[in-house]
Amino acid sequence: MKKLSAYENLSFNTRQSSAYMRAIQKFSKCGDMTIPEFSTAIGISVPTGTKIINDLLAQKLLICKGKREQIGGRPPLIYGLNKDLFKVVAVEVLLKRIRVGVLNVQGEWLAYDEDGDFRLKNSQESLDFIVQYVQSFLKTSKVVDTEILGVGVSLVGMNDIHSGKTYSYFDFLNEPLTKYLSGVFQKNVYVENDSYAYGLAETKLGGLREHQNGFAINLSRGLGMALLSEGHLHAGSNGFAGEFGHMQFGNGTRMCVCRKTGCLGTEASGFALEMDYREHVASGEQSSLTTEDPRYDDIIKGALKGDELCIKLVYDVGEKLGFALGNIINLLNPEIIIIGGKLARSKDLLLDGVMFGARRSALTQSMKNCHIELSKLDDRAGVLGAGLNVFTKYELL
């Protein structure tokens, strides 16, 4: 039987579960508050607010944080969430890496692990490995099961937010992936596209946090985009929005994973960087890299160490990306664009190319009013977003 968290058990242990859940949500979003502040925020009387807080203290969902320092008068007590009872499991499944961690409601990692030797395949064996990897991690981390609200999964490819069905991987299941994993982990499981999860991290804790309209570009081996519109991430009617890498771009002949040619992701991505390197070396250009067939991570490192070919290739990828972004700037008039993912490690080598390309295609005034910068989040942004997605489902963020 599914083990409910203390927060979910409110609906079984109290007759006023709705009010108590609203209280938890308010504390999660607003932070620590006194009883009068809480009562005002939720629109109830101070005596009712006092009762709710005392009940939540008894269930250990809230804790007293001490007294607030003030000039004159008796200092009031401050209350806040017991963050130890609000945890989620976050999983990121990429083509060549898997990450898993336990996250609290404040976005802090309590446990974390990753496997860089993982290779994603559309097979039962690959799915079984993911499940076993997560289960083994949880056993080692010794997280209390009833403290876990749910499991958030970031998965590359096209994932339907309504049905929970995945179309790029694990489409052989006789049920939606979300339902399958919910049965395995005995928790509510939420599956999102990797770029949407990354965008959620930027929206809640990163560069999009103070903005209403913008893009978060996920530039690693592939290329994706999360679109922030009027303060909300735009998922589209099925959750397929943001497939920026499949926008047709020029007359390229490289075959994309979608089995079409001409996709932007084959010209501006980590995959494109690897292909460019091979072509340039095959034509006789020299590089200081000693690896015969380097991954895009190696090319980025080479560029940062001053390898001229690597610098040129990173800049060129940036320029192509910028040129494509300029067209989107003309279309949607964003106030900010955040560029994240592994290629963001190349810093100004990439950003200079992006700015040059964007100025070539964007209208002058639209470009003037759009700020483009590199993400300040680290490589865990995608798995962070997967975890934050669970908290948003419970309206705790």
Image: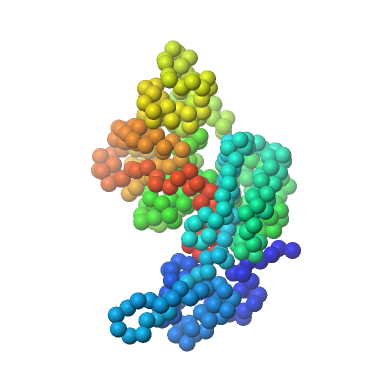
Number of marks in the rendered image: 0
Residue 40: tell me if it is visible: no
Relative to 204, say whether 246 is above or below.
above
Quadrant in which residue 310 is drawn = top left
- Residue 135 locus on image (x, y percent): 68, 51
Relative to 194, say whether 79 is above or below.
below
The residue furthest top is 284
Observer-nearest of 240 and 280: 280
Residue at point 31%, 45% (across, down): 371
212 sits to left or right of 145:
left
- Residue 87 locus on image (x, y percent): 57, 61
Observer-nearest of 174 and 273: 273
- Residue 178 locus on image (x, y percent): 65, 52
Quadrant in which residue 97 is drawn = top right
Residue 284: tell me if it is visible: yes
Observer-nearest of 305 and 349: 305
Observer-nearest of 148 and 229: 148
Relative to 29, say whether 192 is above or below.
above
Identify the image quadrant of the N terminus: bottom right
Q: How is the image coloured?
A: rainbow
- Residue 215 locus on image (x, y percent): 40, 46
148 sits to left or right of 320:
right
Residue at point 57%, 30% (across, down): 259
59 sits to left or right of 308:
right
Residue at point 64%, 57% (across, down): 142
